Image (spheres, grey):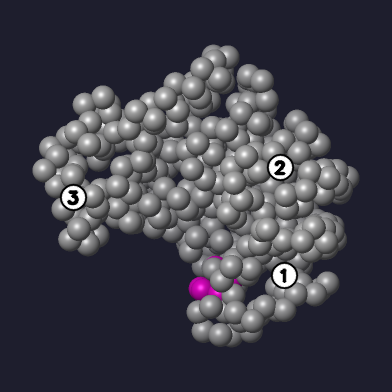
Amino acid sequence: MTELTFDIHAKDGDARTGTITLPRGRIRTPAFMPVGTAATVKAMYPQDVHALGADVVLANTYHLMLRPGAERIDALGGLHKFMNWPWPILTDSGGFQVMSLAKLRKLDESGVTFQSHIDGARHHLTPERAMEIQRLLGSDIQMQLDECVRLPAPEADVERAMRLSLRWAERCKAAFGTQPGHALFGIVQGGESPALRRASAEALVGIGFDGYALGGLAVGEPQDVMLAMIEASAAYLPAARPRYLMGVGSPDDLIESVRRGIDMFDCVMPTRAGRHGLVYSRHGRINLRNAKHADDPRPIDPESSCEAARIYSRAYLHHLVKAGEILAMMLLTTINLAYYETLMTDIRAAIAAGRYADFCAETKARWARGEGPESRA
């Protein structure tokens, strides 16, 4: 076992708050990990991401293996030094990006052969190579290589992919070997089948990992299906290990998944939305492209802990968005990440106080009321 420890501090139903401890720092859970796909959280300085409350960021194996290359990053001192982020980093395995981005994929027992979406170069990604890349990057939490199936799909295809992912999980653990200070997570697959999710979870626990992720969700299925699959998986995962829901999601997805025992999340939603004129706030989502904001002197949220949400008017932000100014992307991304990290802080406090159900109800009611009690919609 590695040097990762996970201490649970409080529980409220299945929701729990705790701390993941690694040599490079502590991760307060439930945790939202900003996505730094290509060794950067887009439109953000690394120190500003940390100052907003992020204890850990996610970087992407697929993108970094293609550009600038894992061997190059290793030669330059590793990913933490390369991107000036001294705190924990989680790297995904690249499996999802191979499914969604690569050209001319060919998958077999050994791994997946694909053409780069950048230059068409051919690559062969095996479980062993996925572990080698992540070891070269030096990430603190590494993910097994798995096969992601687009849903809906025939159950036979889902089961085949799940069984293959389990065989790859065994190979990943063997290839991971002993890496003091670094952790390896397995990934539960099984599509929309509770039985397959249970079988995957139980088999992964038998192999033994430092934490367990739920993959193959948030790919277009209804929220109720996603939540049912969380329940079908979490019940068979060890309570003493972190649970990570990959690629999720919206604020509502976060609070409902925490309610079902999830500890970690990542999603491009807050950063991507910020680059496209959308803001997340205590009062819900605001589309700053809408003309109604052109003459609105109000800030996004006068009570926000984020200065950008307090001091810039909606009219000014609307102008920046419509003009295509880079500052719009920077400010809106900051506002969104600040809101997400504040939401996680509030979630942890509500769990610790034993009032998580009330917190969820109050938060959803505020979202339903819209942009604030003084809204001029």
In the displayed structure, does residue 157 sit left or right of residue 139? Answer: right
Instruction: Name the residue nearer the viewer: 81 or 194.
Output: 194
Rendering coords of residue 59 (x, y %): 54, 57
Q: Quadrant of the C terminus?
A: top left
- Residue 275 spot, x, y in % from top left: 33, 56
Q: Amino acid at mark 1?
A: Arg
Q: Amino acid at mark 3?
A: Ala
Q: Relative to residue 12, is residue 256 depicted above or below? A: below
Residue 15, quarter of picture: top right
Q: Which residue is mark 3?
A: 291
Tell me the crowding category of disc 1: few under 14, some 14 to 19, or many 20 or more residues within 10 angstroms, Cα based.
some
Name the residue located 21 percent from the left edge and 26 percent from the top edge: 374
Residue at left offset 28%, top offset 28%? 372
Residue at the disc numbered 1: 129
Q: Find out whether residue 117 is within the magenta segment.
A: no
- Looking at the image, can residue 238 be seen? yes
Q: Between residue 317 and residue 41, name the one nearer to us.
A: 317
Mark 1 to mark 2 CA distance (whole Å): 30 Å
